[in-house]
Amino acid sequence: MKIKLSAFILFGCAFCLHAFSQPNNAEKVYTIDAAKIKAHVQPTMYGIFFEDINMAGDGGVYAELVKNRSFEFAAPLMGWDEVKDKGSDGSILILNRTAESPDNPRFIRVNSKSEAGYGLINEGFHGMGIKKDNRYNFSVLAKSVTTPTVSLQIELVNSRGEVIGSATVEPSSKQWKKYTTSFLATETEPKAKLRILVKGAGTVDLDMISLFPQDTWKQRPGGLREDLVQKLADLKPGFLRFPGGCIVEGRELETRYQWKRTIGDIASRKMIVNRWNTEFAHRPSPDYYQSFGLGFLEYFELAEDIGASPLPIINCGMACQFNTCELVPLDELEPYVQDALDLVEFANGDINTKWGKKRAALGHPKPFNLKIMGIGNEQWGPQYFERYLIFEKAIRAKYPYMKLVASDGPFPGGDIFNYSDKILRSRKTDFIDEHYYNSPDWFMKNVTRYDHYDRKGPKIFAGEYAAQSVTTGSPKNKNDWRCAMAEAAFMTGLERNADVVNMASYAPLFAHVEGWQWTPDLIWFDNLRSFGTPSYYVQQLYSLNKGTDVVPVTLNNEAVTGQDGCYASAALDNVKHELIIKIVNTNQHPQKADFVWQGVKAGENGSLTVLQSDDPEQVNSLDEPKAIQPATIEFTVSGNHVALVLKKYSFNVIRVKI
């Protein structure tokens, strides 16, 4: 919404909080010294943390619709059922070819005993989201076992069992061969299934049974779900951290994330169990695996697509310390270190290098310009630092330009944090990764957390944070406005201290409404729809309005860190030539405010963007995706100030041309 208003009318308009229906408050004068640069804001200041939790990858942003497409789950037929047309009969058998294909050994043999259709049906990830008139691309690795050969009837069926799209494949080769077809869907259906019927009497072997929508992000075959990637692009993130998160560690070392297994031929990417499969007794997910269709090349390409710097995190020879605490002996750490060095070469190497050549062969000869990487995820203690220092030495020796991120452990304070912080500061580590999942009250009380950090010490990466409406890890947590407002207040402290805090990212990123393990999350989705939470819009407003240089905003000569329930930061945008003021009013009543600046001359134009709800417990949802969303008005400026009324429970972004 855009409305042209004068500053005088803006001060008293009903849009700004029904200001005079509440008790009259004395006007507060906020002063911005635009001539005093406190810090430069890094382009990487606000970014994205990605982890395959809550079905963020398989069943989420990775657009594959078939679950267990290669029969490699612990239960080989999980996601599949036998299906028979009337009068048909047959049998199925899971076979193993480990010697021939060690990374994808299993396949299914389907024996049809009649001309009628016998075969399989796949349930997808809580169903398959199908859109009317959209084209769907089917593929399968198949081998004909008998003569004469049989044909495959490929059908999408809706929740009533009715066919809403179909095609035929005729696998004739006696050797493994990929067969493809495509078809249009005749109906929109959130809970479709894929049915494969063998027509004719005979036997056929099947593997890598796949179905993708054609409308993937950038129309890439086998690519990513368009609406979810678009929401990431709309954040204009400075960086993309991947692949996690505890995914990096694994419950044990065997199930850690190994990037080299996630590139190349899809059929050769070795599937493993997802470490969130059985993590929470209240949200068991026995069918949660990682196919690695979304692998390291796809992560790098995604970062490139959305204009974000890539930030990969690698395993440091430690499994999750909350689970097995399994360690690689120091004298056996070399392969892990080599993986880190090879990753840099894969991202940045000339096409004549081993891994640069591999990147080029995969279709991306241009380097990804990797500048920063993390060593370990959420590790702590002496064992971590012994291993971290080995990685640091090796990477610095070969790639001295690389910046490294080290873990400060899982908590924002206490013995683990203090021990880690002391060591990392003594080492002059590039970035210290701090995590905090706490109450909204904690976030508001800690808005000054970085005010007294050593300005010459390591930079801070606020790598994982989110306000918890109930308690950390509770399944009852909600993405309500109270949490988002507290995060907005806390982020004024990140921005005021941009000389210390160079990166920050909310976590987790994605959650399927039927497949989540952890809440709250930034973006929620089902098989067809998605929505950004109030926290999403807070992150977006900070990213779109970060500016280039922090300047002080004060109330009575003090930083605005909670006086009268308000929190503020200010920055100059030297690209767009604007002054940006962010202020959060956490009060249950509106507040009159006059923003006065010095050191710059204002133009005539300004804008006010407001994110607000009268109800702190308000949430967005699939049915009401924009119950809370930003609204913008434009105004004219006269002189060196603008007076307005801050709505109750509001996050406000003011931009003034200078």
Image (cartoon, grey):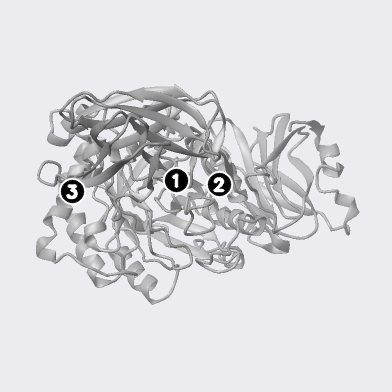
Viewport quadrant of the C terminus: top right
Q: Residues within 10 Å of mark 2 (few under 14, many from 20)?
A: many
Give residue 409's position: percent from left, percent from top: 36, 66
Whichever of callouts 2 and 1 sits on the residue coming sooner in the sequence is 1
> Residue at the spot x=18%, y=32% of the render?
145
Instruction: Answer left or right for 336 relative to 22.
Output: left
Task: Choose between 506 and 417: the one closer to the eye.
Answer: 506
How much space separates mark 3 and mark 1, taking CA atoms? 32 Å
Whichever of callouts 3 and 2 sits on the residue coming sooner in the sequence is 3
> Residue at the spot x=10%, y=61% of the render?
332
Closer to the eye: label 3 or 2: 3
Q: Name the residue under label 2.
A: 539
Kind of residue at badge 1:
Phe
Q: How crowded is mark 3: few (under 14 residues within 10 Å), some or many (20 or more)?
A: some
* Number of residue marks: 3
> Residue at the spot x=61%, y=43% of the render?
34
Kind of residue at badge 3:
Asp
Q: Name the residue under label 1.
A: 125
